[in-house]
Amino acid sequence: MTEFENIVIGKSSVPALIITVILMIAIPVIFFIYWRRKHAEQTNISWLIAGAVGFIVSARVLELGVHYFCIVADNPVSRSINENTAAFVLYGIIMAGVFEECGRHVILKYIMKKNRIRENAVLYGIGHGGIEILAILLPGMITYLVIAVLFSHGDVENALSSLKITEETAAAALPSVQAAAAFDYSMMAMNVIERLLAMLLHIGLTVIVYYGVINVKKAYLPMAVLLHMLMDTFPALYQKGAVPLWSVEVWTAVWTAVIVFIAGKLYRKMKA
């Protein structure tokens, strides 16, 4: 497997990945500790757990089930979506917006009927965004760190053996090894900033949906879905190679600011 012999782990890859892993853990923990200490008497941990479970069920079970048929499996529907950038982007943003925001709406309206206060809505958002980091993104970063450490020793055969990479799995494993080798401090900064924005995004969207639920205003659910779709547009375009990475970061920051601004106004309108 000569393609692995030419891979050189950058000097900053291992320390950058170590810092990234630490900060990935720290972000949701700090958000939770800060909010819990500030509103210890009002908040209830069940809302944090509900946010985490809501994300897993809506985004990682139901949405992924649809993705398997529409994106992963080989059929006329998946081929037509994957072969057309516009169809791929439209499908992706609709699925993300509908599943996550409708999941939020269902749980906030029909399940979380006790302790309905605005502080708990924020706690729900922390649970939603936090579990996305800890259960979905953190394992990938830890994998990159393990790869970088093994390949940094210079013994390619031992690294391949430790990672159980064979001739049959080499093609699938190569992109991950290349990504770990190229990871540096700039990528660390982008990943951390992206997660901070995502946490604020999930908190903001939760407050918007929650406001609609407690005030029985149906317009706020479609508003949250639309805002989520708009925010996901550039990330979906980037997946198809249609826009550069920097534009995704700028786009995400702009829409996160918009969502947080709207959520902040609604939060202040709700009774403490």
Image (cartoon, helix red, strand yellow):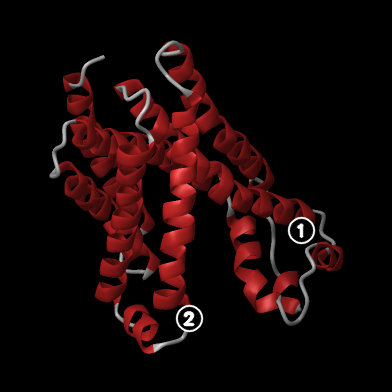
- Asked which quadrant contains residue 124, the reply is top left
The Cα atoms of the two marked residues, 2 and 1, are separated by 33 Å
The crowd level at tag 2 (other Cα within 10 Å; few <14, some 14-19, many 20+) is few
Residue drawn at x 69%, y 66% is 7
- Asked which quadrant contains residue 253, the reply is top left
Residue drawn at x 69%, y 61% is 8
Q: Position of residue 150 (x, y in %)?
A: 79, 55
Q: Residue furthest bottom?
A: 76
As helix, strand or loop, the secondary structure at mark 2 comes to: loop
Residue drawn at x 23%, y 53% is 230
Mark linked to residue 73 = 2
Residue drawn at x 85%, y 68% is 157
Q: Is residue 13 visible?
A: yes
Instruction: Give left or right: position of 109 versus 49.
Output: left
Mark with earlier residue (2, 1): 2
Q: Position of residue 238 (x, y in %)?
A: 36, 63
Seen in the picture, residue 212 relative to 80 is either above or below; the reply is above
Q: Which residue is mark 1?
A: 151
